[in-house]
Amino acid sequence: MPITKTSDSAVWRKRTTLQQWALWGGWFLLVVFFIFCWQVMTKDTIWYFVADAPTQAADLGGRMFPPRWSYIDVLWAPLWDTLNIATLGTLLGIAIAIPVAFLAARNTTPSVLFVRPIALFIIVSSRSINSLIWALLLVAIIGPGILAGIVAIGLRSIGFVAKLLYEAIEEIDETQVEAISATGASAAQVVDYAIVPQVLPAFFGISVFRWDINIRESTILGLVGAGGIGLQLQASLNVLAWPQVTMIFIVILGTVVLSEWVSAKVRHAII
């Protein structure tokens, strides 16, 4: 029953027949839609494998433990490559994202009709393609190695950083811009003294947050040949060396937890 609020109290009113049928019709359509989606998702499912999944998972878990702790000596160099991919890729993305963000923001773009749509298209294109797909394409273009991973992370980071940064630019206090402009300052001076100081904390927070995300994404780029610890993961999976896989998972988990802690500390110090 819908509730009608008055100045003193809520009044309960019974739904009309039409409202009641509309409510039940909505629920019926929702159930039909759910059944349709379930059939689409499971039409190729082999339910025997699903029923056998707990047994297979237990068998695989037994093979993965205990971890091969001696294998950690092999992982230091690939882990260092992974950190370099994430860090250099983040810096590359930031370097490109800064001008794109200023071109996309309504209050700093030189043209709302022409330049801004191009900048927004760059942002959307970067955010639409996953870093793993970027890496797959770049490995085919420039060959395997950490360079492909760095460029893939950079291309993926452009959209994320530029989107959040241009939104921060559009939300600045315009009175500061007007005050600096009133002194006869040039457009570059207005940006330098009125806009940049306001968005600088947000910029640092966005950059550190993106670096934290890139640490996680760069750990799997080696699966397509883009270097890093993912290469060792792929090699171990190929030979079914499950104790080594467990060790790699532990190292990746430790790295992600550490990067998350560093990111949180830096963002707290800045913001």
Image (cartoon, helix red, strand yellow):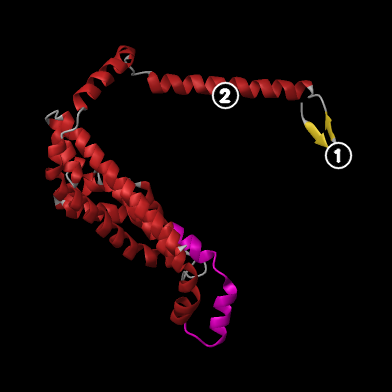
Q: Position of residue 5 (x, y in %)?
A: 82, 37
Q: Where is residue 146 in the image (x, y as percent from the top left)?
A: 17, 52
Q: Earlier in the sequence, mark 2 or mark 1?
A: 1
Dot label at residue 260: none
**In front: 44, or 254?**
254
Structural crowding at the residue carrying mark 2, measured as other residues with C-alpha within 10 Å and reported as few (<14), some (14–19) or many (≥20): few
> Alpha carbon of mark 2 to alpha carbon of mark 1: how far?
33 Å
* Residue under numbered circle 1: 6
Asked if one can make out residue 107 in the rendered structure from this viewpoint, the answer is yes
Q: Which residue lies furthest to the right in this view?
A: 8
Q: Against 213, is 69 above or below?
A: above
Residue at 54% of width from left, 20% of height from top? 32
In this figure, which residue is indicated by the disc labeled 2?
30
Which residues, given as a range, are shown in magenta?
164-186
Q: Quadrant of residue 15?
A: top right
Q: Position of 110 compared to 243: left or right?
A: right
Badge 1 density bin: few <14, some 14–19, many ≥20, Cα 10 Å = few
The answer to which quarter of the image holds residue 123 is bottom left
Q: How many numbered discs?
A: 2
Q: In this rendering, would 240 be left or right of 16?
A: left
Q: Where is residue 183 in the image (x, y as percent from the top left)?
A: 55, 87
The residue sitting at the bottom extreme is 184
Residue in the foreground of this view, choosing between 105 and 63: 63
Task: Between residue 49 and residue 40, name the one nearer to us.
Answer: 49
